[in-house]
Image (cartoon, rainbow, N blue to C red):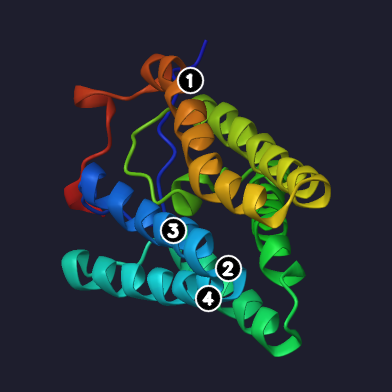
Amino acid sequence: MTEAKPLPSIVRRRAQNPTLKLVLEMGPLVLFFVTNWKFGIFPATGVLMAGVTVALIASWVLTRHLPIMPMVTAVAVIFFGALTFFFHDDLFIKLKPTIVNTIFGTVLLGGLAFGRPLLPVVLDSVLQLTEEGWRKLTFRWGLFFFLLAIVNEVVWRTQTTDFWVSFKALGSMPLTIVFALAQVPLIMKHELKGDDAPNRDHW
């Protein structure tokens, strides 16, 4: 039986402060929720566009690094937000989570099919896992992103705009956090420690 080998990440970097990361991700969504509650979906869309842009700039200023997922999300928010204003139709901003989550799910499962677990890149992870661990975790996250896309479609098609905004701001993120915490046993089982972990000085 061969010993499990680590799967090298494309780029090694220091971990971002978890609290800062949560604030940068949740801040624009909370502002989106509050603005929609007070002024409606179109002003809220503008606030969301500004919020993700500021969060991305803050991430770069504080860490000199732009995480893949927030960067893709910000581009999608600005693109679909612009379509929302241009056509004066909130359908576009509602479709954004479906399309973005489908893209992430496709990238993860597609990469896995070609033997390239891309989860460390997508999630900007600094974890050190065995190859088997990365494969399993990538598969789970790929399915989860597709689940989020399906749930978003169900919610915006069957509920009011205010309910969708509430779910987007206060439901999707907690659901993602719960899912991430549920992966802790798998991570602990396949985590590389001590001499098994690759030396980061070589990257």
Examine the rendered structure and indicate whether residue 12 appears above or below residue 47.
above
Image check: 143 left or right of 180?
A: right
Nearest to the eye among marks 4 and 1: give it: 4
Mark 4 lies on residue: 43
Please report the residue visible at 44 percent of the width from the left and 58 percent of the height from the top: 34
Is the residue under label 4 in contact with that under label 2 (CB below 8 Å)? yes
Res. 125 image quadrant:
top left
Q: CA distance from mark 3 to mark 2?
A: 9 Å
Identify residue type, mark 1.
Answer: Ala
Please report the residue visible at 52 percent of the width from the left and 10 percent of the height from the top: 1
Please report the residue visible at 52 percent of the width from the left and 28 percent of the height from the top: 179
Between 134 and 56, the one lying in front of the other is: 56
Q: CA distance from mark 4 to mark 3?
A: 10 Å
Examine the rendered structure and indicate whether residue 158 appears above or below residue 99.
above
Identify residue type, mark 2.
Answer: Gly
The answer to whether residue 104 is visible is no
Which callout, 3 or 2, points at the residue further toward the start of the chain? 3
The answer to whether residue 153 is visible is yes
Residue that lies at the very extreme toward the bottom in this rendered image: 86
Which callout, 2 or 1, points at the residue further toward the start of the chain? 2
Q: Secondary structure at mark 3?
A: helix
Mark 2 lies on residue: 40
